[in-house]
Image (spheres, grey):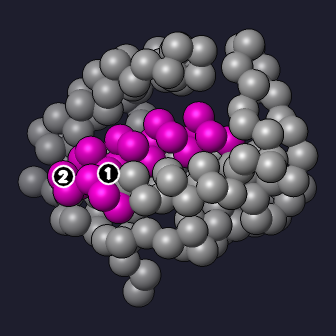
């Protein structure tokens, strides 16, 4: 069983590969520029991607509090856009894998309003501000604690 206590680049890439299996998505780190519909944000160029991806994995590993690790993953993977597609999905599932590895309850995201989630992501993209995502994240953590596995 793979445990997400300490991340490696290969582990994150493997998770992305599993989540996009059967879709027409290139494997591994993207090798072309991407744009995000609905925002002016332009993700880093591919030449800068590898060291930035290394820094994201290091930041997640450096955090000591599991919900903080998960929040970093849920915010920075979509912000960096390391893959051609599936970045938000990978960030959310990586966050859950981290929480689960540390015996926290995973998030279902079913009670998060899609519009609120999109707004929170856009604020991260355009203002590099995680306040709204952190609020949604904390609400979901509380919901999970109050409603699951009792």
Relative vertical location of residue 32 with respect to residue 18 in this rendering, above or below: above
Q: Secondary structure at mark 1?
A: helix
- Give whichever of 19, 3 is nearer the camera: 3
- Asked whether residue 103 appears in the rendered view, the answer is yes
Image quadrant holding the N terminus, namely bottom left
Q: Secondary structure at mark 2?
A: loop
> Residue 68: image x %, image y %?
27, 45
> Residue 75: image x %, image y %?
47, 36
Left/right placement of residue 78 relative to residue 34 reads: left
**Label 1 neighbour load within 10 Å: few <14, some 14-19, many 20+:** many
Contact? badges 1 and 2 (CB < 8 Å)? yes
> Residue 15: image x %, image y %?
59, 66
Q: How many marks?
A: 2
Question: Dividing the picture into quarters, in which one does residue 62 lie?
Answer: bottom left
Range covered by the magenta-colored residues = 61-81
**Residue at figure coordinates x 37%, y 17% from the top left:** 132
For label 2, the residue is 65
Which numbered disc covers residue 81?
none
**Residue at figure coordinates x 50%, y 21% from the top left:** 128
For label 1, the residue is 69
> Residue 93: image x %, image y %?
49, 53
Q: Main secondary structure of the magenta part?
A: helix
**Label 2 neighbour load within 10 Å: few <14, some 14-19, many 20+:** few
Relative vertical location of residue 142 with respect to residue 92 in this rendering, above or below: above
Asked whether residue 94 is drawn in magenta, I would say no
């Amino acid at each position: 069983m793979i445990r997400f206590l300490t991340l490696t680049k290969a582990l994150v890439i493997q998770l992305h590969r599993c989540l996009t299996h059967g879709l027409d998505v290139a494997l591994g780190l993207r090798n072309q520029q991407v744009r995000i519909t609905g925002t002016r944000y332009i993700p880093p160029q591919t030449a800068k991607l590898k060291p930035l991806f290394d820094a994201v994995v290091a930041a997640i590993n450096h955090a000591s509090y599991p919900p903080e690790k998960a929040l970093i993953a849920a915010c920075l993977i979509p912000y960096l856009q390391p893959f051609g597609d599936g970045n938000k999905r990978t960030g959310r599932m990586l966050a859950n894998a981290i929480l689960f590895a540390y015996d926290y309850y995973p998030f279902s995201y079913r009670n998060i309003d899609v519009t609120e989630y999109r707004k929170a992501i856009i604020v991260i993209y355009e203002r590099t501000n995680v306040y709204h995502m952190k609020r949604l994240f904390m609400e979901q953590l509380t919901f999970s604690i109050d409603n699951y596995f009792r």
